[in-house]
Image (tube, rainbow, N blue to C red):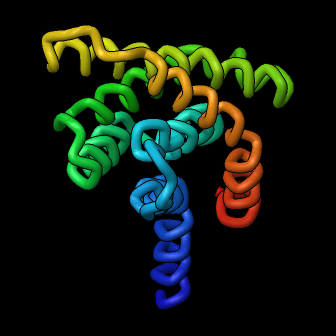
Amino acid sequence: MTVSVWQRLDQAGRSLAPVAVTVMLVLLGMVPLYLPCYEDVAPALALMSVYYWAIHRPDLIRPSVAFVIGLLQDTLTGAPLGMTALVLLLCQWVVVSQRGFFLANSFVLLWVGFGFIMFGAALVQWLAFSVLELTVVPLEAALFQALLTLALFPVFAWLFIRVHRAFLKEL
């Protein structure tokens, strides 16, 4: 009896790995890097994580989890409440609907797919900020954020692969 309880606890802990990694990335994104205008172009770390896990383990990052993580990020960053939650939900919906395509292709196409998702997310955020501000917000910051996030994706994908192999291989 004790063994099965410990096994279930182990499995539950392993199943939380994608959520824990995503929340840690949200917190990592909060670390101040004293660079000029960095907060305007900070990489979308949570989006990278939701993208990867929606392809490889959509059962562990459900839409409700992505929504809560987005609300957490909005609360911590001071962004309009629901902005990141909307972007993460849209990302998850698009990726899960195209999951078969992403799983059947190479990392390069996975990266290209992330580029489309990232630029789409940047456009959605830009439109939302423009509507909220009742003026056309400059697009440059959103584009630089998208480019920086896209450039950093392989590094974080390597991290996600390591976590996937270490914690989720037997689930």
Name the residue rendered at 67%, 19% in the picture.
113
Position of 100 relative to 13 (above/below) = above
Q: Residue furthest bottom?
A: 2
Which residue is at the front of the view, 66 or 135? 135
State the image coordinates of residue 58 (x, y, percent, origin top left): 52, 37
Position of 61 relative to 7 (above/below) = above
Name the residue rendered at 41%, 45% in the picture.
39
Residue 25 shown left or right of residue 147 in the figure? left
Name the residue rendered at 33%, 47% in the picture.
69
Looking at the rendering, in which quadrant would you find the C terminus? Answer: bottom right
Which residue is at the front of the view, 101 or 68? 68
State the image coordinates of residue 43 (x, y, percent, origin top left): 53, 41
Q: How many marks?
A: 0
State the image coordinates of residue 149 (x, y, percent, origin top left): 60, 36
Position of 68 relative to 4 (above/below) = above
Q: Residue furthest front?
A: 36
Quadrant in the rendering for residue 57: top right
Which residue is at the front of the view, 140 or 145? 140
Which residue is at the front of the view, 10 or 22? 22
Quadrant in the rendering for residue 26: bottom left
Q: Is residue 59 visible?
A: no
Residue 2 shown left or right of residue 30 in the figure? right
State the image coordinates of residue 140 (x, y, percent, origin top left): 48, 20
Name the residue rendered at 68%, 60% in the picture.
163
